Image (cartoon, rainbow, N blue to C red):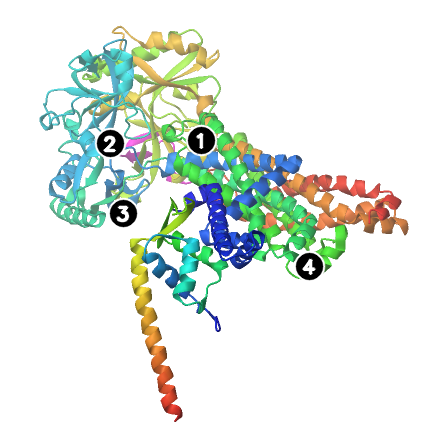
Amino acid sequence: MSEKSDLPQGTLDLLILKIVALGPVHGYAIAQRLQQVSRDVVQVPQGSLYPALHRLENRGLLAADWKETETGREAKFYRLTRKGRGQLDTETASWQRLAEAVSLILRLSEGGAE
Amino acid sequence: MSWWSRWWRRGQMEAQLEKELRFHMEQHAADLIAQGRDPKEAMRLARLSLGGPEQVKEDCRDARGTRWLEDLWQDFRYALRTLRQKPGFAAVALLTLALGTGATTVMFTMINGVLLKPLPYSDPGRLVLVQEQTDYSTILGNLWGFTYPNFADCGRESRALAMTAWRFSNGTLSVPGPAENLNGRQISANLFSLLGIPLYRGRTFLPEEDRPGGSPVAIISDALWQRRFAGSADAIGSTLVYNGKSYTVVGVAPAGFRLDQGDADVFTPLAQDAAPYLENREAHRFLVWARLRPGATLAQAQAELALVGRRLAAQYAKSNKGRGFVAEPLRPDVGDVRSTLWLLLGAVSLVLLIACANIASLLLARAVSRERELAMRAALGAGRGRLVRQCLTESTVLGLCGGVLGIALAVIGTRPFVAFWPGSLPRAEEVHLDWHVLVFALAASLFCGFLFGLAPALRVPTQALERTLRAGARSVAGHSRRLHGSFVAAEIALAVVLLVCAGLLGRTLLRLSSLDPGLNVRNVLTARTALSPATLPYPAQIRAAWDDVLERARQVPGVEAAAMVDTVPMREGNNPIGYRTSPAEAPDNQQPVALATSVSPDYLKVMGIRLLEGRFFDGRDRMGHESVVVIDDVMAQQAYGRQGALGKHLWIDLGGDPVRVVGIVGHVRYWGPAGDDQAKVRAQLYYPFAQVPDRLLRRWSDLMSIAVRTRVAPLSVVEPLKQAVRGATGDQVIYEVRTLDQLAGDSLGRQRFLLLLFSLFAGLAMLLACIGIYGVLAYLTSRRVPEIGVRMALGATAGEVTWLVLRQSLGMILTGAVLGGAAALAAGRVLLRLVEGMRPAGLSTLAVTIPVLVLAALGASLIPALRASRLDPLIALRQE
């Protein structure tokens, strides 16, 4: 747990969509998963997780149902809607394009400095 | 989920949010405990890492997107609470608003029903009125009724229009039941189907019945069906004798069906009953309506009609030269009711505006005293937008509550108002509250709420908060004084406009009532009279029957004299004819015109018209003797200048032979006191009914009325007269019975009605303005109490203090009066254009009305002024 990065603006939604896409999941599990998957590099402020979830639900990208967990407690499970799936695909594509472009530029500048 | 249902279920959503966050923390804590933490410590850490549940909740609420609605709801409840806290203020404000919006809504309900609603036919937007139009104008304008041949030609050649025609008729119904005069309409066979109105019973006319010699059939109104046939199904197929002709009833029109403003009870086939005019290209007697065929436009129809018009003008130059056809959308004909209604809506809107100004100044006063509260909230972090929104919500709630009350008032008030209308209101049956009216009323009250909330809202403090907070209760509303002053000035100005208008109307009515009508309206009864249908085909019998009717009328106890006349002064209907003073022909549009009246010898005596020169008619003026006329002094002047007209010859459009002027009588205000001065035709000409040629006699006879002068109250002879006139066959009837007094009163009905309402509105406006000025002054003075205390402590007398306050109000009042006077002059010009008999607004009316208002307003401001002068300086100073 050495370096932690803040999430770039707007990427939290994308990460949430991606995690929810793997199957219905409740808020706490999303937080856990985000931390595990990013190998603790990405600092997810738990305080902004829920507003983000609710915003995505209002925009119709996520849907939610109350279901029992394995431990027998009731929790709010989020799942991806069809609209959410589309959003995830376009966001992923545009993220990848951006990331490629950025790394391209970074490599270029190294070459230019020599 | 829509924002609406999210908001509606916000309680449930809150509970779920709470549950979701609790689950998160407990799960987190459980994990931490599993890692070996102390349970209490674990819960604290979980709470910490979530970042404060309340903050998260607040963010989640924002994410819900219903924040504005929740704020609105909060403001709304806050507004209701503040209203309840000050019941006195709320009551005054709501009552004022309810009266204002109520009156405005009543007027709009009328306008909506009478002017805005489409005609009650199927797809009325595609119906058009077709008229003949000449390229020259006569005294009656350049639009004409259709001749039947023109109608037939246009109907045959038009691709864009399906056409139908109708005309007025009336006559005596003698079977079944007692004889009664009925209004009827002669209609083309396709009229009902073209309008898209199915009959209630039976069938419409067949095309072969709408032809000369077709079998006589009739459609009756629902009213007649109930009255004469008791609503029985047997009515279809039964016989009706109308104007002496037997008809078979084939249909019943739906209840409330009408073609124009009048009621019609009998519909007969046009081409069958109007047979004499079918080939006549000069008898402009038919109204033509049409429906645009599917896909056709009005412009296409116009173009087509123009083409047909040019062709007919070439083919029938004698009758159709310079004559074309024009189509326009069919609209209800409501006459001068249109301008009356708009005038009244204008007047009530002014009252509503005054009410708004009143409430705005009250709200402003409250806003000033709440400045600290608002500053405190701003200091605690409320945004300016949020505070402005709250102020506006408050005033809008007030406006809406007033509006709802106003709508309730309008629901109650509309019917009585319609009943109160002078004469009969056209389309009265269409006047009722509908969603157009509701939308109007709600929009008006929202607008009002916004209007009077604006001033307080814009005063929401944002800068120098601490100064406001520190200033304490004594923050003198220095800059609100000017705003308050302009409210008062605006109220006074609006009230002046209404008061001056009322004054102008009052002066007009006074002047008109004092005019000499040219006849003696007391104790005269007039009634249209229909002879027995059996006499009508025979001219000699018609003449004998009229002599008999007059003789019988003279025998009625209480009757002094009886005469017959075709057009009665101030009653609907007139007969303008062209005349010449030399035999030379002149074109239609250049002939001078006079109102021709056909009378019997006693007419002058019955009406009390003055004989100026020569003689009136007597028994010698019959067929076979020299044709004579009597003219009025206006015509004598117009036709012959100052030279004596007596004994001169006239050529008129009646017989052909010249007629000799044997007498000159005084001018009668035929168009009523209001209309006569501006009437297009003022010259009057009388000719003896006894000299009407045989070929015209039947038509003339149809138009005749009797007029009797009585020794007793004229209405008391109505029944005996009815009995006496009935005649040997029992089917002679009189109808449309009026006294001249009634006709004269009715002719000023519109002016009187406008005067009454404008006085009412002006009174209301004055009252509101006085309340307003009192409120503003009381408020401003209460703010100056400490200052006044100082002045008094330094030796100011009570009189000086009174003057100090009055001076302030006088400034506002005079500003308002000057502005109002200027606006009133403009309003006077509108009245001049719209109301008959008005004279241009003179300064004299302003000089009489404005001081009344100024004095009333000063009186209202005297109360706070006197109260200020009686202040105890010690108490006043301590108020700090």
**How many other residues sit within 10 Å of disc 1, few (<14), some (14-19) or many (≥20)?**
many
| Real-space CA distance between mark 4 and mark 1, rounded to the nearest whole angstrom | 69 Å
Going from N to C along the chain, the mark reached first, 4 or 3, is: 3
Residue B784, position in %: x, y? Answer: 78, 49
Highlighted range, magenta:
B639-661
Which kind of residue does numbered mark 4 sit on?
Leu
- Residue B465's disc is 4
Q: Nearer the viewer, mark 2 or mark 4?
A: 4
| Left or right of B568 on screen, residue B477 | right
Q: Per the image, is B650 magenta?
A: yes
Q: What residue sits 11% from the left and 40% below the top? A: B156
Residue B690, position in %: x, y? Answer: 28, 20
Residue B467, position in %: x, y? Answer: 73, 59
Residue at image mark 1? B672
Direction front: furthest residue: B36
Give the dominant element type of the magenta stretch: helix, strand or loop: loop
**How many other residues sit within 10 Å of disc 3, few (<14), some (14-19) or many (≥20)?**
few
| Left or right of B509 on screen, residue B606 | left
Residue at image mark 2? B657
Which kind of residue does numbered mark 3 sit on?
Tyr
Which kind of residue does numbered mark 2 sit on?
Asp
